[in-house]
Image (cartoon, rainbow, N blue to C red):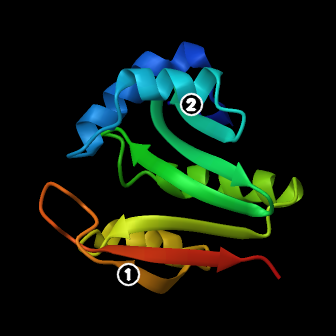
Amino acid sequence: MADVIIRQATVDDVDDIYEIERLCFSEPWSRDSMVYELSENPRAFYIAAELDGKVVGYAGLWWIGDEGHITNVAVRPGYRNRHIGNGIIQVLIDFTVQEGIMHHTLEVRRSNDPAINLYEKFGFVVEGVRKEYYANNKEDALIMWRHQE
C-alpha cells in the first residue's frame, strides 16, 4: 500500500471533499460552499489526505489574523483508525504555525469522543461551550483552543 500524501487541497478536489463531507456530517456543507472555500475565499486554507490517488480525508481552516479557525476535519469511512486524521491535524498545525498562526480553535460535538481525544493530543483544551449549537439535535458544541507557546 502506498503512503498517505497530505497536500494543499485545490478546487479539483471538490467532488471528493464534498463526498466525504456528506458521508461524515449530519449537516454537511453544500457543494457550492466547498467550491467557494477552495477557489474564492481568501481566508480559507484546506489540505487533503490522498491515498493511492484518492482523497480520503481533508481539513479546512479560516485564517483570521494570528488565529486559525478549523472549520472541518473528516476522514472517509473505511479509512479511519489508520492515523490519517492525526496526520491531517499535524500537517495543518505545523504549516499554519510556521506561517504565523499562534492560536487554533474549533467546535466539536460534545458526544464526539474520538475527535475530542484527537484534538487533545495536539494540545487543544475546552475553553467554552456553545449551547444547542447543532440544529439537527440541539447538541452542545465544545469550543476548543490550542495556543502556541
In the displayed structure image, the side of residue 59 where residue 90 appears, left or right: right
Q: Nearer the viewer, residue 4 or 107?
A: 107
Number of on-image labels:
2
Q: Which residue in the rendered view is the most extreme toward the top? A: 12
Secondary structure found at label 2: helix
Q: Which mark is residue 37?
A: 2
Eyeballing the image, is 36 above or below 22? above
Badge 1 element: strand
Mark 1, residue position: 129
Q: Is residue 142 above or below residue 107?
A: below
Can you give x and y, in whole percent of width and height, for residue 120 in the image? 51, 78
The residue lying at 38 percent from left, 22 percent from top is 31
Viewer-closest of 62 and 83: 62
Compute the Cα span from label 1 to label 2: 26 Å
Q: Residue at x 70, y 41 (%)?
A: 43
Question: Does residue 54 appear anywhere in the picture?
Answer: no
**Residue 149 locus on image (x, y percent):** 83, 82
* Label 1: how many Cα within 10 Å (few below 14, some 14–19, many 20+): some
Q: Residue at point 26% right, 74% down? A: 140
Residue in the picture at 63% in, 21% down: 39
Which residue ends up furthest to the left in the rendered image? 137
Q: Is residue 88 above or below residue 14?
A: below
Q: Give residue 69's quadrant in the image.
A: bottom right
Q: What is the x, y in percent for residue 139?
A: 20, 70
State yes or no: discs 1 and 2 in contact (Cβ < 8 Å). no
Label 2: how many Cα within 10 Å (few below 14, some 14–19, many 20+): many
Q: Position of residue 41 (x, y in %)?
A: 64, 31
